[in-house]
Amino acid sequence: MEIFFQICLVILSFSSFSHCLDNGLALSPPMGWLAWQRFRCNTDCVNDPKHCISERLFMEMADLLVSEGYAKAGYNLISLDDCWLDKVRDSDGRLKADPIRFPSGIPALSDYIHSRGLRFGIYEDYGNYTCAGYPGILNNMKLDAQTFADWKVDYVKLDGCYSFPSQMDKGYPEFGYYLNRTGRSMIYSCSWPFYQLVTKMEPDYATISKTCNLWRNFEDIQDSWQSVTSIIDYYGDNQDTLIPLAGPGHWNDPDMLIIGNFGLSYEQSRAQMCMWAIMASPLLMSVDLRTIRPEFKAILLNTEIIAVNQDPLGVQGRRVYKKQGIEIWTKPVLPKSGQLYSWAIVVLNRRVDGTPSQVTVPLRELGLDSGDGYHVRELNEHKDVGIISPDQAIQVDVNPSGVVMLKCTIIRVPPFIP
């Protein structure tokens, strides 16, 4: 480790901080629970103690991740978002939590979450202030990185309000360098490319993918199907740029799962889960786990779909067909045989005309050409379709604003022994 830091210091003397984050983390897309989309910046714990941003909220969610089976399924992170901070730093210049809403302090909250076998995440901003007006990290990067390490943080989400996008090519790698220098392993989530894209800058994705474990390219998700589909469109329309960036340790982040809130129907919730899985997206829930309905909980806990998302190949899925409201996305997954892979396939119906659409899925045209065929399984209903040869096609009925997800597992024929 010390040799690695010496190499980084040599690099710093000649260029920037950009290649020094090599933390060996997030080898599959991170999974867990974040506060923002569902609870926003509700700080009124007097009138709304159940829903305000407080240590009680995060402790309850940590307990539910464990007791309700989410942690067992892979959701092992609980992360703060904006509005956990006090408005001022302490007398030593360190960040501190709001003393009313977090009376035990962040170290105690971190210990509580770790005691449940979970990872602890925190939010800050590369700017003078966070988006909600709390202290940012500018001029305090080294101190704040060490503070997070002292608090045993496992995941850092760094936003980009109140900062200059033109300075992010230097600032985000610099903070990543300081995180590494602490010696504590912390997943680094960046908002770097999004803020540059909205100001018409061209992000330096080569550096971003070497600096951050995950990064946001698009606007915040809202609690609506329109928001979900706009994100899907962005990732499909820009897939030639984005797909090569994704892989073990570095992921495109289309933002949180909103399944179980108020804006998505059951079919649309299935669609978000399947699309986020095939896009190799972080699976970061933002929902009230105390009140989620069983049918939405079942979507989030579908371990067959989660397995596609967490597949060790780490390939981001590609949109291979888009016509008349129907989209087909494919993703190579394990197991493989020689140079031939298994595949996940999502058929997404964007139509709203009120009746299911029958879609024919020709395997060979989608690149599935193993002569021994594939064992096909539908993952939402957990049903086997059968053995299909590459010259055959599968017919599926896809509900409006709904999805069908297939796993086509390559059949490995044992070698002939005379």
Image (tube, rainbow, N blue to C red):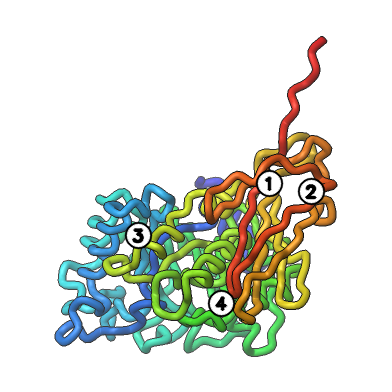
Residue 141: where, in percent of width, then height? 44, 72
* Residues at marks 1 and 4 touching, judged by CB atoms closer than 8 Å: no
Q: Say if mark 2 contacts mark 1, CB within 8 Å.
A: yes
Q: Residue at x 60, y 69 (%)?
A: 399
**Amino acid residing under circle 2:** Leu
| Location of mark 2 (residue) | 368
Q: Which residue is drawn at 42% across and 61% down?
A: 155
Residue type at mark 4 is: Val
Q: Mark 3 points at which residue?
A: 120
Whether pointer 1 and pointer 3 mark residues with C-beta atoms closer than 8 Å, the reply is no
Report, in whole angstroms, how far the alpha carbon at label 3 lies from the one at label 2.
Answer: 41 Å
First in sequence, mark 3 or 2: give its number. Answer: 3
Tell me the amino acid under the disc marked 3.
Phe
How many angstroms separate mark 1 from mark 4 (CA)? 26 Å
Q: How far apart are marks 4 and 3 (CA)?
A: 27 Å
- The residue wearing badge 4 is 228
362 displayed left or right of 56: right
Front one among 358 and 235: 358
Instruction: Find out whether the residues at labels 4 and 2 contact each other: C-beta distance under 8 Å.
Output: no
The answer to whether mark 3 and mark 2 are in CB contact below 8 A is: no
Q: Is mark 1 on a helix, strand or loop?
A: strand
